[in-house]
Amino acid sequence: MKVIFMGTPDFSVGTLEALIEAGHEVVLAVTQPDKPKGRGKEMQFTPVKECALKYNIPVYQPRRIREAECIEELRKYDADIMVVVAFGQILQKEILEMTPYGCVNVHASLLPKYRGAAPIQWAIIDGEEVTGVTTMQMNEGLDTGDMLLKTEVVIETKETGGSLHDKLAQAGAMLCVDTLKALEAGSVTPIPQGETTTSYAKMLDKQLGNIDWTQSAVSIERLIRGLSPWPSAYTDWNGKVMKIWDAKVEEGSTNATPGSIVIVEKDAFSVQTGDGILKICELQIPGKKRMDAGAFLRGYQIKEGEILGSCFIQ
């Protein structure tokens, strides 16, 4: 098929490469505009742009895809289908219906669960045991189009947002290739989604990682994993932002105030939560690299009875 590919972040790249390797003719890659990054504010290409240039695929970076001139630009390529993977802009009806096979989206959840911008992380935070990827025929709603194919991925006990992202990106790439094959063969029947059983997977922000120690140890541990590597979970320790990268739910409880350090060992320390105790195994403080709790305790003094609290990262 002649494909117009729309995508922006790392999650999209695997699908673009899979389509090329499967023999599809990707005639155009549409991605978000370059953005300044780092202290020097140098303009940085999106991951999809970098990949497209490697394969000599033309790149188009509209600020607003809904503009009439953008629509006409897409029409020039006479594509059979558009494939959309985390593009980052809403497509209007004229674009959705431009090609014979319409627009197919690769979404990182088992729809209709976890519609929205951050389904990968919210599945972990909510304690799901299984998630997956769904391909759908896009409509004008937000992740509400008819479903085409699905594949399941098990969420492991110590799964993080980062590790699950990589698994789902790979699964989505394979599923997209299978979906285009099925569409060409006429062997797939679109299925309406119906009502979702989960909340909307809203976009992540840094404030979400501010640990509320009155929550249960189980929910805080899931938050830590879900928000790793970004935006990360954190707490206040003596006026400093302490990022928590790894923790373990411990049996038992105390009468201490939530946030209180109740046990200090050689290689870890434990915190009382609103329900249960959480052992802190890996952390990071400002100006330092990630370290295991043992290394931290060898360099810094922390005492039972100290209280970790809420803080705010700009």
Image (cartoon, grey):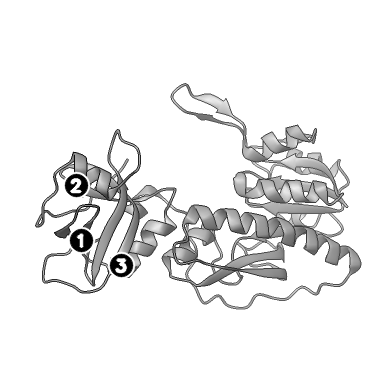
Displayed quadrant of residue 285: top left
To which residue does mark 1 refer?
271
Q: x, y (%) of residue 11?
A: 61, 49
Dot placed on the residue nearer the N-terminal end, 3 or 2:
2
Counting labels gives 3
To which residue does mark 3 refer?
249
Identify which amino acid the numbered label 3 is placed on: Val
Q: Are marks 3 and 2 in contact (CB under 8 Å)?
A: no
Identify which amino acid the numbered label 2 is placed on: Trp
Q: 66 and 33: which one is in front?
A: 33
Q: Residues within 10 Å of mark 2 (few under 14, many from 20)?
A: some
Alpha carbon distance from label 2 to label 1: 12 Å
Q: 219 and 290: which one is in front?
A: 290
**Closer to the camera: disc 3 or disc 2?**
3
Q: 54 and 1: which one is in front?
A: 54
Identify which amino acid the numbered label 1 is placed on: Val
Q: x, y (%) of residue 144?
A: 64, 67
